[in-house]
Image: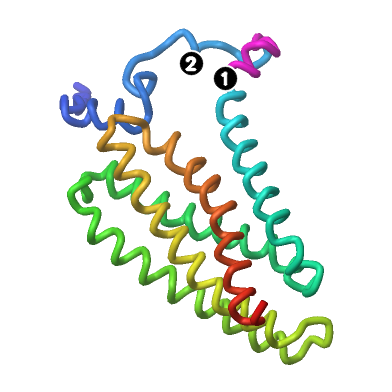
């Protein structure tokens, strides 16, 4: 005789699955059964265009920020070398924070009421990691003839601040999404990336103005 032991999910587990992964996570849907080869171009555009529009707005804002600080870039072209590094680092560290908090929410380790603990941990870790990478850039500026020490100092100061800001948003947005009843896995990461791209540049260029006395 063979005994098959099947564990049924509790109602609470089903509700968590619906919150983080949508109704399709617990209820088979027609959409899940559809084959990609049967998808129409119109269907793909309808499913993706909303998020692409959000990213597009973020890119426009980033372009506006760069244009607003055009004069400082003309005087110190080396600053432009580190724009991709700064934006990329902010998105990377914010995504790590975002994924960590979403996982903790899904496992029931965090609630929206724990926001203060999340802010403290994520901001502190962001400053520490950004400070280490910024210090490496500062040392590199002394060795590379194509970059002044002032630019190296600007990047060294901006990295921990941007890293702290990105971690803050990456940690708080999932909590806010869960509190408002949205899917944190879908809404928080794109929103964090969009905000960090534009505000990170503002932080970077303002620090450059202060360091270089412009």
Spot occupied by residue 39 in the image (x, y as percentages of width and height): 65, 12
Principal secondary structure, stretch drawn in magenta: helix
- Asked if disc 1 and disc 2 are in contact, CB closer than 8 Å, the reply is no
Residue 90 magenta: no
Q: Is residue 22 visible?
A: yes
Residue linked to disc 1: 47
Q: Is residue 5 visible?
A: no
Nearest-to-viewer mark from 1 and 2: 1
Residue 38 vs residue 6: left or right? right
Residue 134: give x, y in percent of width and height. 58, 78
The residue segment tinted magenta is 38-46
**In the displayed structure, does residue 154 sit left or right of residue 140?**
left
Answer with left or right where residue 176 lies relative to residue 61: left
Please rate how many residues cluster around mark 1, counting C-alpha atoms within 10 Å: few if below 14, some from 14 to 19, many from 20.
few
Res 194 → quadrant: top right
Find the distance from the CA under tag 1 to the CA under tag 2.
14 Å
Image quadrant in which you'd find residue 56: top right
């Amino acid at each position: 005789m063979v005994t098959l032991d099947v564990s049924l999910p509790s109602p609470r587990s089903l509700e968590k699955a619906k919150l983080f992964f949508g109704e399709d996570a617990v209820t088979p849907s027609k959409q899940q059964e559809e084959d990609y080869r049967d998808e129409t171009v119109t269907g793909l555009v309808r499913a993706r265009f909303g998020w692409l529009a959000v990213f597009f707005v973020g890119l426009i804002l980033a372009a506006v920020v760069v244009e607003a600080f055009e004069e400082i870039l003309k005087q110190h072209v080396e600053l432009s070398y580190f724009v991709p590094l700064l934006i990329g680092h902010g998105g990377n560290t914010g995504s790590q924070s975002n994924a960590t908090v979403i996982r903790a929410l899904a496992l029931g380790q965090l609630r929206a009421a724990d926001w203060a603990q999340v802010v403290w941990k994520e901001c502190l870790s962001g400053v520490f990691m950004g400070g280490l990478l910024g210090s490496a850039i500062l040392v590199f500026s002394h060795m590379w003839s194509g970059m002044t020490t002032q630019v190296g100092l600007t990047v060294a100061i901006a990295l921990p601040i941007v890293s702290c800001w990105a971690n803050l948003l990456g940690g708080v947005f999932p909590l806010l999404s869960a509190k408002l009843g949205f899917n944190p896995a879908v809404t928080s990461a794109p929103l964090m990336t969009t905000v960090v791209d534009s505000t990170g540049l503002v932080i970077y260029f303002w620090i450059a103005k202060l360091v270089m006395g412009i």
